[in-house]
Amino acid sequence: MSEVVQNDSNVCASETYLDITLKVGSKSRAVMCLFDTGCDTCILPGKYARRQELRPAEKTVYAAKGTEIAILDVATLIFTLNGQELTGDFLVTDGVDEIILRYSFLKRYGCHWLFDECALVVNGRKCVLKHRPSKAKIRSIYVRSPVALPADCSVNVPVKLPTSDRYAVAADWVNKATELRPGLLVARTLRPDCDKFAAVPIININKCTKHQFIHLLSATCNE
């Protein structure tokens, strides 16, 4: 889980976050979102769109480093911010790992940024801004599609690596060696910035039993 601290007069950061609550059917989920006056579209990571009604998207989006961000669909998101229900159209993608509110959304709800108070006024209601330490040097790795790992075997598992900062420069990445679960090891691997053909070697060192396979679902995460 990412470390989050409330902003104060001694904290200066270019990343500015709000606490929101997503409404998905009859359930609610508390998350953080970034508001970005330089972004020309609202972004919703695919992991938050699984129970949303989706419609086709006809838009191309690029990160600041010039790489294209693959857009899957469009979703109309309903969420709560400081007690008031808001809505907006979001482009859904697996290429970005956080919710982003764009300039036109802020304009639509009459937002005013109070720099000296570290607050954002939305529809006349003041909302506390929060700072999250930059994750530009960290990327989460997600299993791209469900996979079954046989006992006592190594498998190259296709993965996706959504960016945690759309302003990050292109660079090669190294994932750390870790144990996902007992007997299931992720190998340390060097990989390029683009995840189009990315895969991670995962070793199942468990011995053969009547349960011969370990199943990983899509979106299984390793940070």
Image (tube, grey):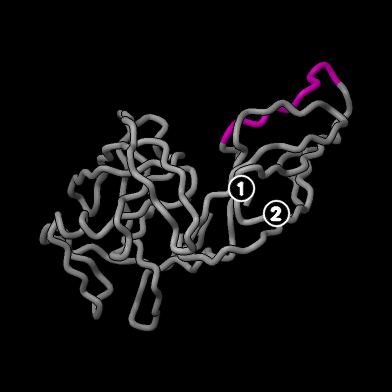
For residue 104, which numbered disc appears in the image? none
- Say few, some or many: other residues with alpha carbon within 10 Å of mark 2 (under 14 / 14 to 19 / 20 or more): some
Query: Main structural element of the magenta stretch: helix, strand or loop?
Result: loop
Q: Quadrant of residue 170?
A: bottom right
Q: For this view, does 7 lie left or right of residue 96? A: left
Q: Residue furthest bottom?
A: 10
Residue 91, position in %: x, y?
Answer: 34, 43
Residue 220, position in %: x, y?
Answer: 60, 38
How many numbered tags mark residues here? 2
Q: For this view, does 85 lie left or right of residue 187? A: left
For residue 191, which numbered disc appears in the image? 2
Per the image, label 1 sits on a secondary structure element best described as loop
Instruction: Return the residue nearer the eye: 128 or 145.
Output: 145
Disc 2 + disc 1, Cβ < 8 Å: yes
Q: Magenta stretch: give its range.
A: 209-218
Q: Residue sitting at 14 percent across and 55 percent down?
A: 109
Q: Residue sitting at 40 percent across and 79 percent down?
A: 11
Instruction: Return the residue nearer the eye: 130 or 150.
Output: 150
Q: Residue furthest top?
A: 210
Per the image, label 2 sits on a secondary structure element best described as strand
Determine whether 219 is above or below 40 in the image.
Answer: above
Q: Quadrant of residue 147?
A: top right
Q: Quadrant of residue 16?
A: bottom left
- Please name the amino acid that badge 1 sits on: Asp
Q: For this view, does 219 lie left or right of residue 184? A: left
Q: In the rendered image, which residue does mark 1 sit on? A: 195
Q: For this view, does 13 lie left or right of residue 157? A: left
Q: Residue sitting at 23 percent across and 62 percent down?
A: 127
Residue 134, position in %: x, y?
Answer: 50, 67
Magenta-drawn stretch contains 220: no
Tell me the distance, in whole angstroms, between the alpha carbons under discs 2 and 1.
Answer: 8 Å
